[in-house]
Amino acid sequence: MDANPGLVGPFVKEHALTFVVIPAYSYVTDKLKGYVGAPANWVVDANGVVRLKGEGYDISGKWETGMKDAIEKVRTGAAAASSTGASE
């Protein structure tokens, strides 16, 4: 990925991807140490802090629900922390 990051933008546009793409292999390997399985899932907050990590996929449909719940948990925690002035 890092060898030619200029390919990422056109690919995302061509395929109309609506999720965030991190085109930096070094960022991923540095921040997400120990996760080498595929697929791997991360929930990263607005400050770039990895809040949740996971590996695998559940074809029963529980994966999507679980990811939505995880994102909401991080979002709710961030909102609560900002309203109280706390930081994680």
Image: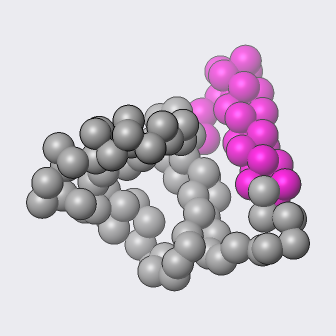
Position above or below: 78 against 64: above
**Residue 66 % position (x, y):** 81, 58
In this rendering, the count of numbered labels is 0
Q: Residue furthest top?
A: 83
| Closest to the observer, 16 or 88 | 16
| Closest to the observer, 12 or 28 | 12
**Residue 36 % position (x, y):** 45, 80
Q: Residue furthest front?
A: 14
Residue displayed at 53% across by 53% down: 50
Whether residue 16 appears in this view of the structure is yes
Q: Main secondary structure of the magenta part?
A: helix
Residue displayed at 17% across by 44% down: 6
Does residue 21 belong to the magenta stretch? no
Does residue 76 belong to the magenta stretch? yes
Dividing the picture into quadrants, the one containing residue 12 is top left
Position above or below: 41 against 86: below
**Residue 18 % position (x, y):** 54, 37
* Span colored in magenta: 65-88
Task: Answer with left or right where residue 9 lies relative to residue 57.
Answer: left
| Closest to the observer, 55 or 10 | 10
Quarter placement of the C terminus = top right
| Closest to the observer, 65 or 28 | 65
Position above or below: 76 against 54: above
**Residue 33 % position (x, y):** 41, 72
Residue displayed at 18% across by 58% down: 2
Quarter placement of the N terminus = bottom left
The image's colouring method is: one colour
Dividing the picture into quadrants, the one containing residue 31 is bottom left
Residue displayed at 12% across by 60% down: 3
Q: Residue furthest left?
A: 3
Whether residue 20 appears in this view of the structure is no
Task: Answer with left or right where residue 84 lies relative to residue 52.
Answer: right
